[in-house]
Image (spheres, rainbow, N blue to C red):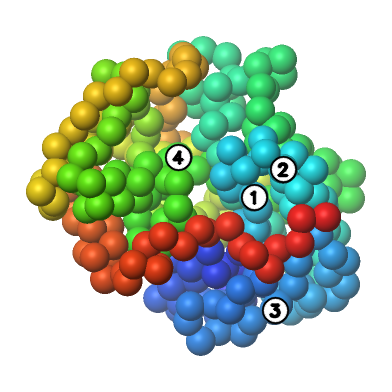
């Protein structure tokens, strides 16, 4: 298939591009930054009218977004314009170009507003529990996909709710990168509270394998949780990281109240897409450390925040 990846030069997008190429697909990238590999590059901002940019593509993976929830809170207008208006522009361009399907990068953080303690994809939402700008934008992105298909008959969609990814090319601020930085620079990894907070962390390669499988026709107009196999605590992450550095763990007072955690299940992806995460936490952290140690000091301290991204 001929696939376009918006945000294809970013952390997850760059891995997805490589996985799609390895699977034999033709790939182009729409991003303000140059792709990491030699593919067609559309240097566009999703907040602008995309015109006929999508002509000739079978599928569009829409990953371009403000993906840092803290940045979304700090710059709510920017987050809304990139995530929501950007998605609207992508859907309009896809409809004009008769693109068969848009595959949207959403987030398992939405599970916090779904009812129940163990969350499947179809669990209903309690809208008053959407308590961040980031969450509101992600839900808005999803509903735009649903409404375009219902009102205009297309494009079809696949909603991919990511777990908490980690891996090479992580942007600054993600927990595994922060732990590696602390371990190498200071010999101490600080954990807030008792470290028992957990998430379904997922190695980026496994996440991108799932996204490639989502091209299957069975995934048309479906929602999937692409999450890790089991809950992984922050303490366990830190313990894996310090095995690669002369470092220790230091427990510091909790700075904020953590929300009630929920288990997020990936059973639908397993049954319909025959997908199961295969990279162990030990191997995933080893890949991350090898990448981290390959960077120079300037690269280690560089912020992922794109200086060329206009804030208005």
Q: Quadrant of residue 187?
A: top left
Disc on the earlier residue, 3 or 4: 3
Q: Tell which of 183 and 27 is nearer to you.
A: 183
Tell me, yes or no, if residue 215 can be seen here. yes
Q: Are marks 4 and 1 in contact (CB under 8 Å)?
A: no
**Dot 3 or dot 2, earlier in sequence:** 3
Q: CA distance from mark 3 to mark 2?
A: 26 Å
Decide which of tag 4 and tag 1 comes sooner along the chain. Answer: 1
Q: Quadrant of the N terminus?
A: bottom right
Mark 2 surroundings: few (<14), some (14-19) or many (≥20) residues within 10 A: some
Q: Could you tell me which residue is drawn at 37 percent across and 34 percent down?
A: 200
From the image, tell me which residue sits under label 2.
Answer: 75
Which mark, by number, is residue 163?
4
Residue beneath label 3, please?
42
49 lies above or below 21: above
Mark 2 vs mark 4: which is more N-terminal? Answer: 2
Instruction: Please report contact status of discs 2 and 1: CB closer than 8 Å, yes or no.
Output: yes
Residue in front for this viewpoint, 256 or 94: 256
Residue at image point 70% right, 33% down: 133
**Which residue is the site of mark 1?**
66
Q: Is residue 224 left or right of residue 298?
A: right
The Cα–Cα distance between marks 2 and 1, rounded to whole angstroms, is 10 Å
């Amino acid at each position: 298939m001929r696939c376009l990846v918006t945000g294809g030069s970013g952390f997850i997008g760059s891995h997805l591009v490589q996985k799609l190429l390895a699977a034999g697909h033709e790939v182009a990238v729409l991003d303000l930054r140059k792709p990491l590999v030699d593919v067609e590059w559309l240097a566009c901002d999703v907040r602008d009218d995309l015109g006929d940019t999508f002509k000739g593509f079978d599928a569009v993976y829409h990953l371009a977004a403000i993906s840092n929830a803290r940045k979304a809170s700090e710059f709510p207008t920017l987050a809304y314009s990139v995530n929501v208006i950007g998605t609207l522009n992508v859907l309009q361009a896809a409809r004009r170009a008769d693109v068969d399907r848009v595959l949207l990068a959403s987030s398992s953080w939405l599970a916090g507003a779904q009812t129940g303690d163990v969350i499947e994809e179809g669990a209903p939402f309690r809208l008053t529990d959407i308590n961040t700008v980031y969450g509101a934008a992600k839900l808005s992105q999803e509903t735009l996909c649903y409404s375009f298909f219902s009102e205009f008959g297309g494009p079809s969609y696949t909603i991919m709710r990511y777990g908490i990814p980690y891996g090479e090319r992580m942007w600054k601020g993600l927990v595994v990168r922060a732990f590696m930085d602390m371990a190498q620079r200071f010999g101490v990894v600080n954990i807030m509270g008792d470290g028992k907070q957990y998430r379904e962390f997922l190695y980026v390669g496994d996440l991108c394998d799932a996204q490639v499988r989502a091209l299957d026709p069975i995934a048309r107009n479906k929602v999937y949780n692409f999450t890790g196999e089991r809950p992984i605590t922050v303490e366990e992450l830190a313990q894996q990281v310090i095995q690669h550095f002369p470092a220790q763990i230091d427990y510091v007072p909790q700075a904020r109240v953590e929300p009630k955690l929920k288990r997020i299940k990936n059973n639908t992806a397993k049954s319909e897409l025959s997908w199961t995460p295969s990279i162990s936490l030990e191997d995933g952290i080893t890949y991350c450390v090898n990448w981290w140690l390959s960077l120079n000091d300037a690269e280690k301290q560089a912020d992922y925040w794109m200086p060329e991204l206009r804030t208005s």
